[in-house]
Image (cartoon, rainbow, N blue to C red):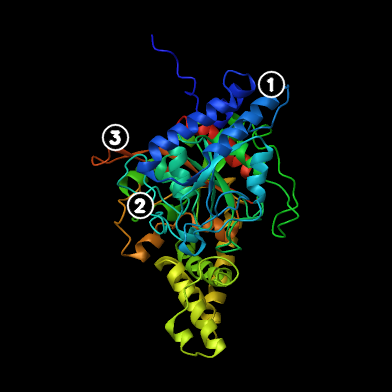
């Protein structure tokens, strides 16, 4: 009989228990994570930077604490990965952009610090679409990540590297950021769990801003229990972030509602608009199977309407680029980041203000990729004189109406189910020439960001795909809840995951 694999239970909860009971050491687990990264990352390109030496030193220190009878915390010895738009005070924070290619942050993001305080081992920084702008990771200045189920396909984006790292078993937990679906969409494409918390539930201190009223850090994990554990660690008030809620975070992993009763008492809202012709046949079938699974477990299925669901993408792609235009103005090549070399025009005696403008323009043109430039220009146009009312103000009104629709729906139901995406992962390059077709991929995810509510994507089976190595590709369904309703979403996700 072959020996049992000591790493078979590659979940945060399983590894933590094994480390605290001394069945495994933190060093054993860290070395195994690094071994998997070294073996798989050349093909998947999930990581931009790996902290081999630092991670091993960290693990040995944790083992020494455990040997002294200490408990380092709820993530004792668990390897985690961090999306590379979340600052660490070691390594680089590039946002997958040439303009920050060599940037080293002088401070640590609150969410990352809380992982370390909880005993986690940060093993590396993961790839993303540049400045989190995209749905495929193809916008990364350092090349795309690849889907572990089929490396010819996208892992999604913008947190594609984090989702690929979890799905491939390199780490059980990774942090991502979600502005319009950037945690949930890649989680669905890669067959793992992705949670976008309520806006303000997790501090944004140290998250490089894309769209400040929409951005939220969230975990990608192998299971709903692991996502709950990660959220319990990173959530809560932060005096460094004025948009972070002062509301104390519950113990999501330990005080979650009983899973069985959470389902039996659940009123699950099914929007009429979520059943539409844009859904891939396999996604439509998985969506119906998920609704049936909830019904069999005792949930009450409630038909609801979200009449402005289809307007979310249009509103989002005005609000998000407008905020990006403002936030990314700071990247000018002067204080930090890439600076263009002096031009012949400067040497020939341009006026100082003209020379400075020329330097700004060339530094930004060299440093930003095409998608970031596109969104900056869209946002600048929407905010410009004469167009502000027609575009940006109108989008804000639609955003309010979308939130009103959701508020009305939650008087009739406790959670809302939709597909996470309109279909399974598509081929790399398949949609890169048509930005509008990529934007439509966000149909179901942008709503939660516009309204500031929590949403989670959970695996919901597979689509048959003969060209994929396994013949199948994962699909996911999304659950949305009222503000600060993460505990219930996590409980019902854990309860239904086996059925799905």
* Callout 2 touching callout 1 (CB < 8 Å): no
Which of these two is toward me, 127 or 380?
A: 127
In primary-sequence order, the first of circles 2 and 3 is 2
Whole-percent x, y for residue 389 in the image: 55, 81
In the structure shown, which secondary structural element does the residue marked by tag 3 occupy?
loop
Which of these two is toward me, 289 or 198?
A: 198
Can residue 499 be seen here? The reply is yes
Q: Quadrant of the C terminus?
A: top left
Whole-percent x, y for residue 289 in the image: 40, 38
Label 3, residues with CA under 10 Å away: few <14, some 14-19, many ≥20: few
Mark drawn on residue 67: 1
Q: Which residue is mark 2?
A: 279
Query: Measured along the vertical axis of the image, is residue 484 above or below residue 77?
Result: below
Whole-percent x, y for residue 286 in the image: 38, 41
In the structure shown, which secondary structural element does the residue marked by tag 2 occupy?
loop
Q: Which residue is mark 3?
A: 470
* Callout 2 touching callout 3 (CB < 8 Å): no
């Amino acid at each position: 009989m072959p020996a049992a694999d000591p790493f078979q239970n590659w979940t945060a909860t399983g590894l933590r228990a094994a480390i605290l009971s001394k069945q495994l050491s933190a060093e054993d687990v860290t070395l195994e994570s690094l071994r998997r990264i070294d073996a798989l990352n050349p093909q998947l390109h999930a990581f931009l930077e790996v902290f081999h030496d630092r991670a091993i030193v960290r693990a040995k220190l944790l083992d020494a604490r455990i040997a002294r009878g200490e408990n380092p915390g709820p993530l004792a010895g668990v390897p985690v990965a961090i999306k590379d738009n979340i600052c660490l005070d070691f390594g680089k924070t590039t946002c997958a952009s040439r303009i920050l290619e060599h940037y080293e942050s002088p401070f640590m993001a609150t969410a990352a610090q809380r992982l370390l305080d909880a005993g986690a081992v940060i093993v590396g920084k993961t790839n993303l679409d540049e400045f989190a702008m995209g749905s495929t990771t193809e916008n990364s200045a350092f090349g795309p990540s690849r889907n572990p189920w089929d490396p010819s396909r996208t892992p999604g984006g913008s947190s594609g590297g984090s989702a690929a790292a979890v799905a491939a078993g390199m780490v059980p937990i990774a942090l991502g950021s979600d502005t319009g679906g950037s945690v949930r969409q890649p989680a669905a494409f890669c067959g793992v769990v992705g949670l976008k918390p309520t806006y303000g539930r997790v501090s944004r201190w140290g998250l490089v801003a894309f769209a400040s009223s929409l951005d939220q850090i969230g975990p990608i994990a192998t299971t709903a229990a692991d996502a709950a554990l990660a959220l319990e660690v990173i959530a809560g008030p932060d005096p460094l972030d004025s948009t972070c809620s002062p509301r104390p975070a519950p113990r999501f992993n330990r005080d979650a509602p009983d899973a069985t009763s959470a389902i039996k008492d659940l009123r699950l809202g099914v929007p009429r608009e979520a059943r539409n012709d844009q859904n891939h046949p396999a996604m439509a079938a998985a969506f119906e199977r998920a609704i049936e699974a909830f019904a069999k477990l005792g949930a009450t299925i409630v038909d609801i309407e979200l009449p402005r669901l289809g307007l979310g993408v249009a509103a989002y792609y005005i609000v998000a680029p407008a905020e990006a235009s403002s936030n990314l103005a700071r990247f000018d090549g002067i204080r930090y980041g890439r600076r263009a070399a002096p031009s012949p025009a400067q040497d020939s005696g341009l006026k100082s203000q003209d020379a400075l403008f020329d330097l700004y323009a060339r530094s930004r043109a060299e440093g930003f990729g095409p998608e970031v430039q596109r969104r900056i220009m869209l946002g600048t146009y929407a905010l410009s004189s004469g167009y502000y009312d027609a575009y940006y103000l109108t989008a804000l009104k639609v955003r309010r109406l979308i939130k009103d629709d959701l508020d009305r729906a939650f008087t009739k139901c406790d959670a809302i189910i939709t597909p996470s995406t309109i279909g399974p992962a598509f081929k790399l390059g398949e949609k890169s020439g048509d930005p509008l077709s990529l934007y439509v991929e966000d149909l179901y995810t942008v709503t939660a960001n516009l309204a500031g509510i929590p949403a989670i994507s959970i695996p919901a089976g597979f689509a048959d795909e003969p060209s994929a190595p396994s013949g199948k590709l994962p699909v996911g369904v999304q659950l949305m809840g009222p503000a600060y309703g993460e505990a219930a979403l996590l409980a019902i996700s854990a309860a239904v995951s086996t059925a799905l």
